[in-house]
Amino acid sequence: MFLLITEHTTVITVADKIFHNPQLDTILIKLASRCNINCSYCYVYNMGDSNWSSMEKQMTESTMVAIAKSLAELADFQNQKFSIVLHGGEPLLIGAKKLDFLLSLLRDSLNEEYPISIQTNGILITSEILDICSKNRTSVAVSIDGYKEINDRFRIGHNNKGTFDQVVKGIDILKSHSDHEFLNAGLLAVIDPSSDAEKIYSFFKELEAPSVDFLYKDGNHTILPLGKATVNSTEYGEWMTKLLNVYLNDKNPLPIRILDDMLKVLLGGTVSKEGMGITDYGIAIIDTNGVIMKNDTLKSSFDGADKFKKPINIKDGKLLDFIASKEFNEYRQMQRPSSEKCLDCPILDICGGGMILHRWKDGAQFNNPSVYCSDQQLLVENMSQLISKFYQVNA
């Protein structure tokens, strides 16, 4: 066991150090357990987990009060700022009144150094909602996968019709708000490797997005992500490489967080983001009923994968005590890859072994490389070559 020695020669274990100094980077609050659309690839509703069906549809005000109190205690305790993300389901299903109630509570407890954002599908955006967000300094990010044909392939309503037109209408309302420069936090897109990467990039520029981030589809070694033929195939890596080339050849590029982060690490920097680089990224999920959960993307691994063995409800227990617990720190340590292939990999400091959910395999659990390992290797190889060419040209 590793030991830490203080200047007074008191011996404490690393585990003790973590126990007495828990740190969170992000608190994700699930305001609604239901959604107004039905994305076919959604890890919450369409990948085997059924926890949502027995939960209250919206977070109660008593739970919101308990959350604000706990986050104020966390802010007083830890020495680093944390971010708050309002999520769902679809968070805007709670309506303007309850949203204002929660945001006012949070801003009474936390100053503007603590960023608050909402991740929404955009359909329920209204001027009233945006006024509330502006007043409470809360930014808004919208999920949309690309141009109409691509977005409406998977992001559909409960009537099986596409959502593209409704989402773009919400984005237009956001762009036209007087405080849009603060409010508009950019776009989030799930990659369809069969799409045209250049056309996707051009479309997002046409939307005048301040930035965009891309996600790989959820999946693992047992249930492969949509669009991936085998564990060793590179459909996503090839798509990202095409996007990278378009991006780097644009004299006025649209910021793409995933590429910026990877390039930053390749050039010697560090990032703090789950599934990227070798960092201990602290994230806690507060579910609609107030129960503290693991990252909910783990739902795609198996039913209940995001549950702690001994969870607490934010209304009944202290968040600080829970994140200092042995079980919570074991969950944090899951971010670090354990497979020999990852530990011996020269690009481990860039990909960090990928997201935990992408490592799952029936029988071997999470002790595997990411199902996107081949894709990431291809992308990093191409990034490295492009950086080398840049330095050669500018030497």
Image: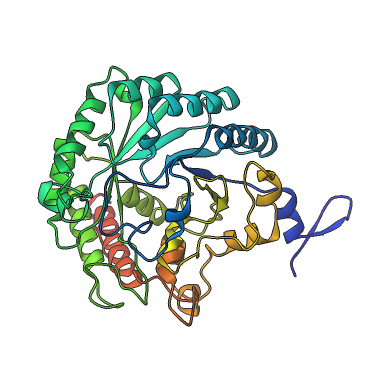
Residue 140 pos. (x, y %) = 35, 33
394 lies left or right of 44: left
Q: State the residue at coordinates (13%, 44%).
A: 202
Q: Where is the N terminus found, in terms of image quarters? A: bottom right
In the picture as drawn, the residue positioned furthest to the bottom comes out as 363
Q: Position of residue 372 (x, y in %)?
A: 34, 69
262 with respect to 336 (left or right):
left
Which color mode does the image show? rainbow
* Along the line of sight, the residue nearer the viewer: 361 or 394: 361
Drawn side of residue 271 relative to residue 68, left or right: left
Horizontal and vertical percent position of residue 142: 29, 39
Please name whichever residue, 250 or 106, is drawn nearer the observer in this view of the structure.
106
**Residue 346 in sight in this render:** no
Query: How many labels sit on residues?
Result: 0
Is the residue 365 above or below the residue 226 in the image?
A: below
Does residue 376 sit above or below 30 in this rendering? below
Q: Position of residue 10 (x, y in %)?
A: 88, 55
108 left or right of 368 in image: right
Residue 152 or residue 3, whichever sits in front? 152
Vertical arrangement, residue 395 with respect to residue 82, above or below: below
Using the rendered image of the protein, determine whether residue 54 is visible from the camera's viewpoint. yes
